[in-house]
Image (tube, rainbow, N blue to C red):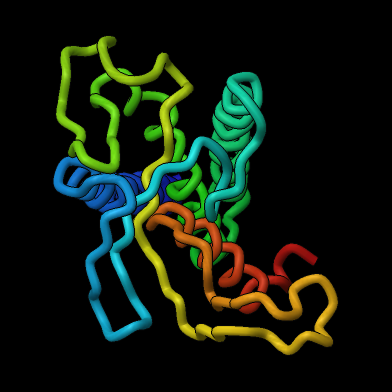
Amino acid sequence: MEQNKKKTLLVILLIVALVTIDQLVKICVKTHMTLDEEIRVFGHWFYIHFIENRGAAYGMELGGSYGKLLLSLFRIAAVGVIGWYIHRLIKRGAPTGVIVGISIILAGALGNILDSAFYGLFFSESTFTQVARFVPWGTGYAPFLHGSVVDMLYFPLIEIDRLPDWIPFVGGEPYTFFSPTFNIADSYVTGGLLYLIIFKLKFFK
């Protein structure tokens, strides 16, 4: 029982720390940069590039207001299920590495939920000429669960001016790898999944 309490405390502290980092970075970007503003960090391979999306991870979107609401509700349900699963794993005495990996995924999902749920309530709208500012609660740019997710990490590792014409669908077009702009919460989800797949897959089997 004492061991379970220690693992529960570890999970809570880890999730709080990861979500805090994610939110501090997002708030700093949103209150200091205009939409599409870009800061070069490392050569031509890493930029802080501020965009917002109303959809899923890495800029993917669902159509319209109902799509946004559906996605937000799905995220909340997913966090609930993952939290319940972590609690069950702790009671079963699962390895700490497995619990930590799933907790990182939970932190990522929770980080993006906070954007969607609350940013529209206390931020003014970010534009291409105007930096967002804090406003009285409920007077922001969007209602509850309809806020936009802040993205800022951009890694155009490989840029090709023109792909060969013989390549189907994209031949003759410019190409960038990796083109999506994402945030720290997205990286938590991706990193947690990769960690579990690479190092802890045997446990789930």
Vertical order, 195 against 53 (above or below): below
Q: Nearer the viewer, residue 108 or 180?
A: 180
Q: How many marks?
A: 0
Q: For this view, does 124 lie left or right of residue 6?
A: left
Residue 187 image point, x, y percent: 46, 62
Q: Nearer the viewer, residue 25 or 135?
A: 135
Q: Nearer the viewer, residue 131 or 77?
A: 131
Whether residue 155 is visible to the viewer of this picture, yes or no, is yes
The image quadrant where one finds the C terminus is bottom right
Residue 12 image point, x, y percent: 36, 44
Q: Residue at x 16, y 19 (%)?
A: 135
Vertical order, 131 against 136 (above or below): below
Vertical order, 52 against 139 (above or below): below
Q: For this view, does 110 lie left or right of residue 195?
A: left
Q: For this view, does 127 lie left or right of residue 73?
A: left
Q: Residue at x 15, y 26 (%)?
A: 134
Q: Residue at x 39, y 19 (%)?
A: 142
Residue 20 image point, x, y percent: 26, 46
Q: Residue at x 51, y 83 (%)?
A: 159
Q: Nearer the viewer, residue 87 or 125?
A: 125
Whether residue 2 is visible to the viewer of this picture, yes or no, is no
Vertical order, 83 against 98 (above or below): above
Residue 80 image point, x, y percent: 57, 31
